[in-house]
Structures are given as structure tokens and as C-alpha cells.
């Protein structure tokens, strides 16, 4: 059953930045696009490389290892059909970022 987890304070994720946080069995990346927060597993669906150093452009993260691009709104890989990135719903509550795992 999915549940909401408080993962970090809003100020820990600067605009156009990210923060890696452990949540249960996942290493979760929380991104701040400057307008919206996103959360995903820290693993590219292509070959499992970490995404924490990937380039963020709006709601798309690009894996630095092989250039694969993922849409953080739905997890869809924009580079190769059939691949997807696990993403989590995000809410901001009273200065804290919560994700549904």
C-alpha cells in the first residue's frame, strides 16, 4: 500500500537543483525545476546508471552516461520507447517535501 513520506525541507532543494534521499529501499532524487518539484528513483532505465548528475531542463532529466532523456511528470523515456523511469507523486506541505511511495 502506498504511503506519503516526508523526505526533506523545501530549502534543501534549490531551484534547478536536486537532492538524493533514501526512502525505504529506494534512493530517490527530488528535483526542483524552479516551478515544480519531481521525484524519481536514482537509476536510469537504460542501464541503471545514476541520474543524480543528470542535466535538468524543465521537467526532463538527461542521463549523463548515455544521453537518455526522461519526462519527470510521467516517467516516460523520450529517447527509447518502452523504457520508463519510476516516478513518485510529490506534495509540498508547510515547507516540507512529501512523496508517495
Image: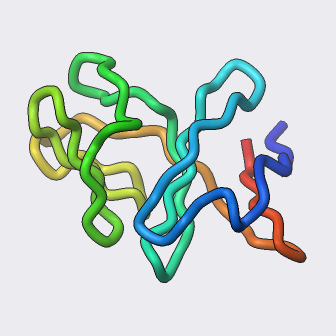
- 60 relative to 38 in the view: left or right: left
Q: Position of residue 42 (x, y in %)?
A: 46, 31
Residue at 22% from the left image edge and 25% from the top image edge? 46
The residue lying toward the viewer, choosing from 80 and 24, is 24
Quadrant of the snapshot with the C terminus: top right
Q: Position of residue 89 (x, y in %)?
A: 64, 58
The quarter of the picture where residue 65 lies is top left
Q: Position of residue 64 (x, y in %)?
A: 18, 35
- 61 relative to 41 in the view: left or right: left
Residue at 24% from the left image edge and 17% from the top image edge? 47
- 22 relative to 36 in the view: left or right: right
Q: Is residue 37 above or below residue 18?
A: below
Q: Residue farthest to the bottom?
A: 35
Q: Position of residue 77 (x, y in %)?
A: 23, 46
The residue lying toward the viewer, choosing from 8 and 39, is 8
Quadrant of the snapshot with the N terminus: top right
Residue at 51% from the left image edge and 34% from the top image edge? 41
> Coloring scheme of the render?
rainbow
Residue at 16% from the left image edge and 52% from the top image edge? 78
- 42 relative to 46 in the view: left or right: right
Q: How many labels were placed on the picture?
A: 0
Q: Is residue 60 above or below residue 69?
A: below
Amino acid at each position: 500500500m502506498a504511503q506519503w513520506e516526508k523526505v526533506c525541507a523545501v530549502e534543501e532543494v534549490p531551484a534547478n537543483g536536486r537532492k538524493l534521499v533514501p526512502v525505504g529501499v529506494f534512493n530517490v532524487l527530488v528535483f526542483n525545476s524552479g516551478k515544480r518539484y519531481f521525484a524519481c528513483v536514482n537509476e536510469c532505465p537504460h542501464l541503471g546508471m545514476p541520474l543524480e548528475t543528470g542535466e535538468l531542463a524543465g521537467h526532463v532529466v538527461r542521463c549523463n552516461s548515455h544521453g537518455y532523456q526522461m519526462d519527470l511528470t510521467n516517467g516516460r523515456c523520450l529517447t527509447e520507447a518502452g523504457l520508463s523511469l519510476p516516478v513518485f507523486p510529490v506534495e509540498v506541505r508547510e515547507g516540507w517535501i512529501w512523496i508517495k511511495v
